[in-house]
Image (cartoon, grey):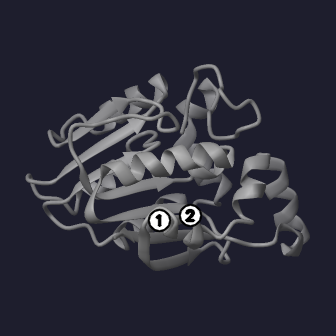
Amino acid sequence: MKSKTKKLYPESGVELNPFMAKNYDNIMNIASLGLYHGFIHKAIKAMDIKPGDKILDLGCGTGLNACIMKKYLSDNGKIIGMDVSSIMEKQFNKRCAKNQNIEFIRQRIDLPFSLSEKFNKIFISFVIHGFPHEIRQTILKNISTHLKPGGALFILDFAEFDMNEMPPLYRFFFKKIECKYAFDFIKRDWKQILTNYNFSDFDELFFFKNYVRLLKAREN
């Protein structure tokens, strides 16, 4: 989640300073050697979005993801983006201004919240790794509460791997850029964690030398 507000978790790397928040998409594209936009398109295509889907995008950022998702929806579909950052809110609303069925809610996803509706799909992209694990559990509870029965969760984030087995250059940049919570995230068995929250029917798609994964799970 991207924010200019005071951090609740000082060692987290997902609450961004104003410069990072304002230039987030460009920074991600540079960091990925120009591959970021194409990669996001591939990941969202793999979500198999249906025309009438109601989608919740947690830590939605600039609205890039929402506008790509919108291409697969009819007028009966809907996207709600949720983020804590006022800078992201301005970018999101500007980018999605012409889409009547896309809405932004300014809200922390790491604190309990309650919306008046449930969703077919929930998407969370490069956000959950940046929180302490006990806070991730709050996020998962929010997700479970807001998915329709049989709904699908999509976590686009780092895969599970041993950082010590990375090539030296990859390991250097990963340790330089990411926070300690990411180092914890990659060690955990996320299929087992999601099983404990009543998810099953897992599927996964890997990117960037298998260091990044789109993990799909369906709520029982």
- Residue 165 lies left or right of residue 154; in this view the side is right
Q: What element carries label 1?
A: helix
Compute the Cα span from label 2 to label 1. 6 Å
Please determine whether, in this image, residue 126 is positioned above or below residue 18.
below
Q: Which image quarter: residue 77?
A: bottom left
Point out residue 188 in the picture as x, y percentages from the top left corner: 69, 66
Can you say whether 109 is above or below 37 in the image? above
Q: Where is residue 38 in the image (x, y as percent from the top left)?
A: 47, 65
The residue at the point 16 percent across, 43 percent down is: 101
Q: What residue type is labelled 1?
A: Gly
Q: What residue type is labelled 2?
A: Leu
> Mark 2 Cα within 10 Å, few/some/many (few <14, many 20+)?
few
Identity of the residue furthest to the top in this view:
6
Q: Quick check: can you spot residue 178?
A: no
Q: Do the residues labelled 2 and 1 touch (CB within 8 Å)?
A: yes
Residue 100 position within the rendered picture, expressed as x and y whole percent measured from the top left: 14, 39
Left or right of 152 in this view: 17: right
Which of the numbered marks, if any, corresponds to residue 63?
Answer: none
Secondary structure of the residue carrying numbered label 2: loop
Res 38 label: 1
Asked whether the viewer can see residue 53, the reply is yes
Residue 46 vertical position relative to residue 149 in the rendered view, above or below: below
**Which residue lies at the image location 31% right of the left edge and 49% below the top edge?**
146
Residue 35 numbered mark, or none = 2
- Horizontally, is 67 left or right of 166 in the view? left
